[in-house]
Amino acid sequence: MTDVIVAGGGPAGLSAALLTEKNGLDTLVFDTDETWMHKAHLFNYLGIESLDGSAFVERARSQAAAFGVETREEEVTGVTATADGFEVETDDGAYAAPYVILATGADRELGEELGVAFTDDGVIDVDVSMETSVEDAYATGAMVRPEEWQAIIAAGDGGAAALNILSKEKGEHFHDFDTPADAE
């Protein structure tokens, strides 16, 4: 069984997937390749002087895949809580995982279906770890921020969700911190 299912393959979803997979959790991303990044050019992303948004997404996908993240080009059509976590539905089938990360941009329909709490501003209500009111369900990026849509913020949200999941799994605060020796 997959440990983490991510609905959405933009900066938030891929950031979360990379960290969970890199640290031992089998992660499956569902992506329709409709990220806003295809309309963007990054001049304001720390560490990137200038990069086309589509090139960024391709680079992020390659990096996540290098760590073992499986990506399927399927739309998530439903998500429900189960006794063991979550069931995610696509037109091609149903998939189960103990954790789900919603990273579908400003499209909050999956959150509504799951029954997560919303703020008065109409965005999904999360805590600092990006966890929703439904335990082990996370929401990231534009779906949790009214009009604060930024690729670097979304990637950070995905990272926060991943680290919280990893902390739960390991039973202590977990930090993904690499050293130069790790790159050798």
Image (cartoon, rainbow, N blue to C red):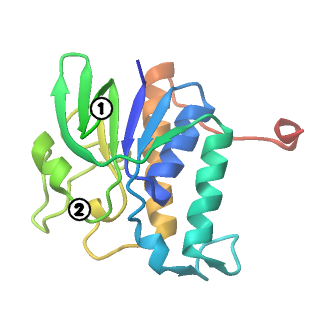
Q: Which residue is mark 1?
A: 136
User: Residue 112: x percent and y percent?
Assistant: 11, 50
Quarter-of-image position of residue 50: bottom right
User: Residue 132: x percent and y percent?
Assistant: 24, 43
Say what amino acid the circle numbered 2 marks.
Asp
Residue 159 seen in the current view? no
Residue 155 seen in the current view? yes
Cα separation, mark 1 vs mark 2, equals 20 Å
Question: Which residue is at a point 16% across and 54% down the rendered structure image?
Answer: 109
User: Residue 122: x percent and y percent?
Assistant: 13, 65
Say what amino acid the circle numbered 1 marks.
Asp
92 and 60: which one is in front?
A: 92
Disc number at residue 149? none
Count of marks overlaid on the render: 2
User: Residue 26: x percent and y percent?
Assistant: 51, 26
32 and 22: which one is in front?
A: 32
User: Disc 1 or disc 2, which is closer to the eye?
Assistant: 2
Question: Which residue is at a point 47% across and 71% down the rendered structure image?
Answer: 37
When the figure is inspected, residue 16 is found, relative to residue 46, above or below; the finding is above
Question: Which residue is at a point 26% across and 39% down the rendered structure image?
Answer: 90
When the figure is inspected, residue 23 is found, relative to residue 152, above or below; the finding is above
Question: Which residue is at a point 48% across and 68% down the rendered structure image?
Answer: 151
State the SS at label 1.
loop
Q: Among all residues in the image, which is located at the extreme front?
A: 92
Q: Which residue is mark 2?
A: 107
- Rendered-image quadrant of the N terminus: top left
Q: Earlier in the sequence, mark 1 or mark 2?
A: 2
138 and 170: which one is in front?
A: 138
When the figure is inspected, residue 143 is found, relative to residue 173, above or below; the finding is below
* Label 1: how many Cα within 10 Å (few below 14, some 14–19, many 20+): many
The answer to whether residue 138 is left or right of residue 181 is left
* Label 2: how many Cα within 10 Å (few below 14, some 14–19, many 20+): few
